[in-house]
Amino acid sequence: MAVNSKLKTKNSELYVWEAVKALFSGFATVFVHLFRRPITEQYPEYKRPLPVRARGRIILTIDPDGGERCVSCYLCSAVCPVNCISMEGAEKPDGRRYAAWFRINFARCILCGLCEEACPTSAIQLTTDYEFCKTDILSFVYEKKDLLVDHQGKDKDYNFYRYAGVTTNYGDKGEHIGEHKPVDVKSNMP
């Protein structure tokens, strides 16, 4: 029994010694940081510059000629993992497709960027704007007029209809940039 009580006493002294060591280690850390210059960012006044690829608020851009880039192909709404994008497509008399209405529910959006990657026209793009807190959840539903901006976003010179291969006021099939004349399949027959 005497050996067992000596072991308990030795263990308790060891625990006390470790506790005192940990306490002074904590005090030493605080003492070191007392004399350092604080690294506080004054957030509302100073906003840290974000990287270009940061994902924030979604916008709809226009092409260099001033028309809407969105052709309502529904790829962004199909690829969205939370189904926060909805739209309805329409067609202008010149054959150009556009979104009659476009809606994003930012209360559900996880800012993953899949919609931006899926968009063939670079119409939908994510910006570095991340400050859009609101108290009313219904105000997070953004319509097309809220999302449409008057610039080209990241792709300044891209115009989908100049590359698309469809007949529009930019040209007939085979007259677009980097496109060959369509092949008449009947001419290939023996």
Image (tube, rainbow, N blue to C red):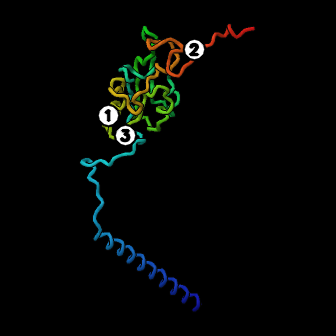
- Mark 1: give few (<14), some (14-19) or many (20+) Cα within 10 Å: few
On the image, the x and y values in percent for residue 184 come to 64, 10
Between label 1 and label 3, give the one nearer the viewer: 3
Residue 92 in which image quadrant? top left
Q: From the viewer's side, name the closer residue of 62 and 89.
A: 62
Residue type, label 2: Lys
Q: Is residue 67 above or below residue 46?
A: above
Q: Say left or right for 13 vs 66.
A: right
Q: Quadrant of the N terminus?
A: bottom right
On the image, the x and y values in percent for residue 121 come to 46, 25
The furthest residue to the right: 190
Residue pointed to by mark 1: 136
Along the polypeptide, which appears first: circle 2 or circle 3?
Answer: 3
Q: Is residue 7 above or below residue 65?
A: below
Q: Do labels 1 and 3 touch, CB within 8 Å? A: no
Q: Is residue 81 above or below residue 24?
A: above
Along the polypeptide, which appears first: circle 1 or circle 3?
Answer: 3
Residue type, label 1: Asp
Residue 105 in which image quadrant? top left
On the image, the x and y values in percent for residue 41 come to 29, 54
Q: Say left or right for 32 vs 187.
A: left
Give how far apart the Cα atoms at labels 1 and 3 are: 23 Å
Residue pointed to by mark 3: 128
For label 2, the SS is loop
Give how far apart the Cα atoms at labels 2 and 1 are: 54 Å
Q: Do labels 2 and 1 touch, CB within 8 Å? A: no
